[in-house]
Image: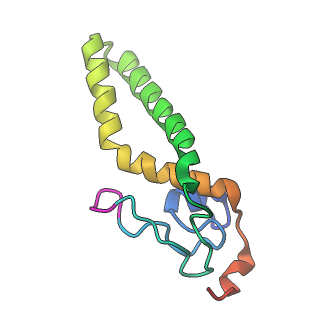
Amino acid sequence: MIPKGTRLYSILHHKCPRCHEGSLYCTGPYQKGFTRMHEKCSQCGLQYAQEPSFYSGAMYVSYALQVALFTTVYVALRVLFNPAAEVYMITIIGAAFVLFPVTFRLSRAIYLNFFFSYDADAKNIKP
């Protein structure tokens, strides 16, 4: 169990980085509109997009997550099966395709947590 008040809690539960109460996304990762975010936190009123194109920087975080995914799949295949090169490519592309909604949402949550930290008193702020 990850305690509330840590950045990891906010990232993995897709909660507001300031109050850890409000949700970042409108739907689940594998539902229609998985990219839609709330404009602001329903609890503390934090604006999630600070400026136009705010989440462009999240592409770098997404790139790092994809590299970690590719490396993990490659090492797991290499250690467990040692298949042909085509199997590596198909498996890595398949894993990236299936996990795209998860990595997309994680990258935005991580990027948002770069700029804001937990404030226990933020829940008392009226939006």
- Closer to the camera in the image, 56 or 116: 56
Quick check: 18 left or right of 101?
Answer: right
The reply, left or right, for residue 109 in relation to residue 87 is: right
* Foreground residue among 110 and 58: 58
Which residue: 36% across, 44% down? Answer: 100
Q: Residue at x 30, y 56 (%)?
A: 30
Residue 42 drawn above or below residue 7:
below
Q: Is residue 43 visible?
A: yes
Q: Residue at x 45, y 54 (%)?
A: 105
Percent position (x, y) of residue 120?
72, 76
Q: Tell me if residue 83 can be seen.
A: no
Span shown in magenta: 28-33
* Residue 7 occupies quadrant: bottom right
Task: Specify the quadrant of the image occupied by residue 26.
Answer: bottom left
Q: How is the rendered protein coloured?
A: rainbow
* Predominant secondary structure, magenta span: loop
Foreground of the two, 70 or 125: 125
Q: Does the magenta-highlighted stretch encompass residue 59? A: no
Quarter of the figure with the N terminus: bottom right
Residue 125 x/y as whole percent: 69, 85
Quadrant for the C terminus in the image: bottom right
Q: Is residue 90 above or below residue 40?
A: above
Does 41 sit above or below residue 37?
Answer: below
80 shown above or below 44: above
Which percent across, then down, holds residue 123? 66, 82
- Which residue sits at x=28%, y=33%? 94
Q: Nearer the viewer, residue 92 or 52?
A: 52
The answer to if 29 sits in the magenta stretch is: yes
